[in-house]
Amino acid sequence: MLTKEEIKFIQEHAHDDPYQLSLSKGQNNGISLGKLVPQIQARQKLAHKLPSWIAQEEVFFPPQLNLEQASSEDTALFKASLIQGKIIDLTGGMGVDSWAFAQLGHSVTYVERDEKLAQITQFNHQVLLGDSIQHIHGDGIDYMKRHTSSWDYIYLDPARRGSKGEKVILLEDCEPNVLELLPCINGNTQLLIKTSPLLDISRAIHSLQGVDKVWIIGVKNEVKELLFLKSQHATMDPVIEIHELSLSNSLIFQGKLSDERKAPCKMGPLGQYLYEPHAGILKAGFFKLIAGDQLVKLGLNTHLYTSTEREASFSGRQFKVIAQGNPDKKWIETHIPSGKANISTRNFPMSPEEIRKKWKIKEGGPWTLFAFQDEHQKNVLALTEKCPVN
């Protein structure tokens, strides 16, 4: 894929601006910038996402569109820790998930219908792993129909682009259509699906006719992936686990939607501490379960919580309340004399940008200004400082 001269060029220009580099002479001693600038750009973008791949100078990266949906090393290795045995990856793509499955010693068959992408991935896998993965060029669904081999797990990360290149979210709109694989779930064969973090979890469970478990995968308080596991023992009310991969113990919360529906909704006024749940908990819809017995909700549709004593084990950001009051200019000038604060809104008629513009608040500083509606649907401001991590 890359000659020694091309690898040397990439290393020498590893930190250059790809755009400026692309404006230089198109050919330089036989070096094609059209080929190598995208490689430099990919390595810069993926430095934190795929460090093991970047460390191998021979790895050749596919076009940008193929990079967009690829898993990070952390999320791929997490998926690999969930399953074991004989695995077939029907939507192989760039091959990060297949790489992770093989890294953990699983038997892996990679299938990809894009011939050029399949060739690139096979080359990269050989660089990274040797010949430990079987590579198949073809359509994953057709391959399953033509082969009767038994698999422990079928893995699917369907393309989230429509026929015109538009982004799609629903399982039935993705390519391939996951629902076509449901008849393949028999015996010991299970199906693991990676989806967009925007997918509605309840709707997906219904479309899949039940699942065994759901994982919400977050990195630094951002939801990166949703995972659905389905077997013959699927249920319409699975356990949903929320994981934050930046933590050594990644599991931060779990529950069932049936328990959420039955949980009481305790609301009350703002106390000494304010809590903002992890993004994965909000994605799961555990708006009542997260409060437990110690916290109360600030408003029916305001997903912020409060207490008089600090609940240090809360899964999310924790703040000490400095002051609270009505949203007006006088209160802002009195309590934020520096005119600088971070802003977060929940169920409030103005966005953070509109608040900054109206009251001339600059971004930054040690304080966070929360704007929300309380239990009486009254607009409230709360000036807070973040609690230290224990």
Image (cartoon, helix red, strand yellow):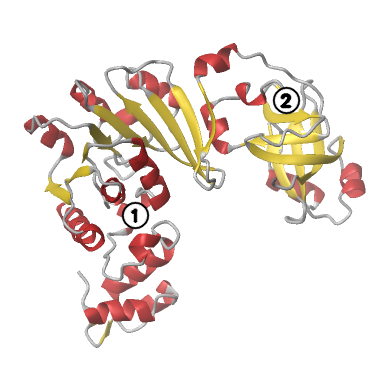
Side of 297 relative to 185 (left or right): right
Give the quarter of the figure containing the N terminus.
Answer: bottom left
141 and 26: which is toward the camera: 141
Task: Mark 2: give few (<14), some (14-19) or many (20+) Cα within 10 Å.
Answer: many
- Can you see residue 175? no
Residue 326 quadrant: top right
Residue 38 quadrant: bottom left
User: Mark 2 or mark 1, which is nearer the start of the sequence?
Assistant: 1
Q: Position of residue 36 (x, y in %)?
A: 30, 73
Q: In percent of the image, x 90 and y 42: which residue is there?
A: 331
Disc sitting over residue 67 in the figure: 1
Circle 1 SS class: helix
Give above or below for 247 relative to 175.
Answer: below
Q: In percent of the image, x 42 and y 73: which residue is there?
A: 19
Total marks shown come to 2
Give above or below for 338 relative to 230.
Answer: below
Disc sitting over residue 301 in the figure: none
Give the quarter of the figure containing the C terminus.
Answer: top right
